[in-house]
Amino acid sequence: MKAFVINLARAVERRRRMEEQFSSLGLKATFHPALDSKELTPEHYAQVDRETRRRLGLWPQADGSIANWISQRQVMQEIVEIGPETAAIFEDDAGLSADLPEVLDALERRPFAFDVVKLNRRSQRTFISCERLATGHRVGRLRYHDYGSEGYVITREAARHFLENTPMMMREIDQALSRFWENGLNVFYVDPPVVSHDEQDDSQIERARRLARKEHMRANGVLYVTWRRVISAVSREIRRRIAFRRLMRGEIGVTPPVNKGA
């Protein structure tokens, strides 16, 4: 399976770590130059749906999150235009398990219908097993979702659907990919995870997010932000519970199953 790694040019140490990990696993990686948050232009900022975020009580997007959103969409665009039909995308702070090559091989055969398979998992939410790979790993759902985009597999059709249906950035890329009730994607998770968050250094994006949250609370007031977020949370809870039932019934997704008889 073709693997893309999104890496900032000045993050030399991160690239070195990723190169060493891929080499040790016998995998090849295509490094995609990430957009530098210090080089954002008015055209880049115009891609953010600030009005919807304000209405939902969400803090302004940090520059690093915007740059990451655009960088990952650039990789998806390449997948749509050139292929392959199934690819893996990694961030440069990913830790790779020794089982990763076998899991990627198993998923490339598309033994079941999926749009996105998240290779990492940050929370301890309830895991519901749906499929079993030849490697022994289980693939299933989380009740109801999990964030993080250190590593995931995406189909060409899913990448096309995501690009067409999320032209504006309203949420960070990991949230936008995980929220099946909004994006209409058939999202699975691997158990046990084969990608983790490499915490050798603090995430640059996370530092910027924390600063953005503090500034947002100061500028808009705690009561206003809290009220907007409560309304948003209630609406989200209702929508995702309904959609989760449809997801479990196989009614959500855009990538058709592989024709085994072909």
Image (cartoon, grey):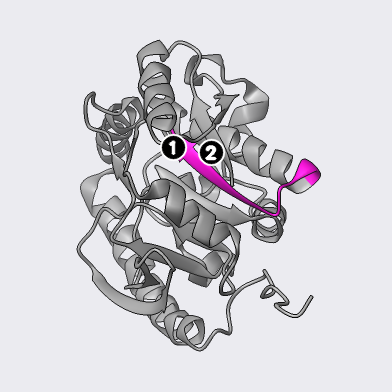
Residue at 51 percent across and 86 percent down: it is 246
Residue at 46 percent across and 63 percent down: it is 179
Q: Residue 84 lies in magenta, yes or no?
A: yes
Examine the rendered structure and indicate whether residue 259 appears above or below residue 232.
below
What SS does tag 1 mark?
A: loop
Q: Is residue 10 left or right of residue 77?
A: left
Number of marks present in the image shown: 2
Q: Residue 125, how many percent across, how many down? A: 23, 68
Classed neighbour count for the residue bearing mark 2: other residues with Cα under 10 Å, few (<14), some (14–19), many (≥20) = many
Quadrant (top left, top right, bottom left, bottom right) of the C terminus? bottom right
Rendered image quadrant of residue 141: bottom left
Q: Nearer the viewer, residue 250 or 54?
A: 250
Q: Nearer the viewer, residue 55 or 19?
A: 19
Residue beneath disc 1 = 61
Residue at 46 percent across and 34 percent down: it is 26
Pointer 1 or 2: first along the chain: 1
Q: Nearer the viewer, residue 194 or 232?
A: 194
Q: Nearer the viewer, residue 37 or 114?
A: 114
Q: Decide if residue 259 is in sight here.
A: yes
Q: Decide if residue 176 is in sight here.
A: no
Residue beneath disc 2 = 69
Q: Residue 247, how many percent across, how many down? A: 49, 80
Q: Residue 233, how many percent across, how many down? A: 33, 67
- Please name the amino acid that badge 1 sits on: Gln
Q: Nearer the viewer, mark 1 or mark 2?
A: 2
Q: Residue 153, how many percent across, how many down? A: 52, 53
Region rendered in magenta: 81-91
Examine the rendered structure and indicate whether residue 251 appears above or below residue 256.
below
Contact? badges 1 and 2 (CB < 8 Å): yes
Residue at 79 percent across and 43 percent down: it is 81
